């Protein structure tokens, strides 16, 4: 693992903010000022493919990167805010519903955060 990959992995594992590639790039430049954005994208993709980090994709939003520890997410439909939620491991319950082996799952529960609810109520 390269020095950039190690630092990126450390940034993601210690962050609970679900960083975008741009945010990772900005943080990595604090340590390696001459790092290229392409280096960040390449390392994020490699770390994800190797199973070191999770990629959280949502339509119309940039991908976010997260630690690998088992957890699920609340996703605000208004602003895209991600919040970790621990619903426990649902693999056995899900496996009972399908006839093929489940390798993994990524549960995203959609909601409106309090800020978006407030904006929605004010616009009515």
Image (tube, rainbow, N blue to C red):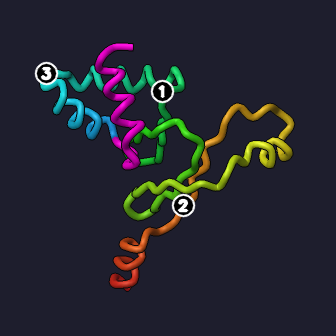
Residue bearing the label numbered 1: 48
Provide the residue span drawn in magenta. Answer: 1-19
Residue 37 drawn at (x, y percent): 23, 26
Is 51 above or below relative to 88?
above
Q: Earlier in the sequence, mark 3 or mark 2?
A: 3
Rendered-image quadrant of the C terminus: bottom left
Residue bearing the label numbered 2: 110
Q: Which mark is residue 34?
A: 3
Instruction: Identify the residue at image location x=52%, y=58%.
Output: 74
Mark toward the viewer: 3 or 2: 3
Disc 2: CA contacts within 10 A as few (<14), some (14-19) or many (>=20)? some
Work out how far the residue at label 3 is from the one at label 1, CA to CA, in angstroms. Answer: 23 Å
Circle 3 SS class: loop
Instruction: Identify the residue at image location x=47%, y=47%.
Output: 58
Residue 114 drawn at (x, y percent): 41, 74
Relative to 38, 93 lies left or right = right
Circle 2 SS class: strand
Instruction: Identify the residue at image location x=28%, y=20%.
Output: 39
Is 15 above or below relative to 100?
below
Disc 3: CA contacts within 10 A as few (<14), some (14-19) or many (>=20)? few
Judged by its main secondary structure, the magenta piece is helix
Residue 10 drawn at (x, y percent): 36, 31
Instruction: Identify the residue at image location x=39%, y=83%.
Output: 121
> Could you tell me if the residues under marks 2 and 1 are in contact, i.e. CB atoms within 8 Å?
no
> Could you tell me if the residues under marks 3 and 2 are in contact, i.e. CB atoms within 8 Å?
no
């Amino acid at each position: 693992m390269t020095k950039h990959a190690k630092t990126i992995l450390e940034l993601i594992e210690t962050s609970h903010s679900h960083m975008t590639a741009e945010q990772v790039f900005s943080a990595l430049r604090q340590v390696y000022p001459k790092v290229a954005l392409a280096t960040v994208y390449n390392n994020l993709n490699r770390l994800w493919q190797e199973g070191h980090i999770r990629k959280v994709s949502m339509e119309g939003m940039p991908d976010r990167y997260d630690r690998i520890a088992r957890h699920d997410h609340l996703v605000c439909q208004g602003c895209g805010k991600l919040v970790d939620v621990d619903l426990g491991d649902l693999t056995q319950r899900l496996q009972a519903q399908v006839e093929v082996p489940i390798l993994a799952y990524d549960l995203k529960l959609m909601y409106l955060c309090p800020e978006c609810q407030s904006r929605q109520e004010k616009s009515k």
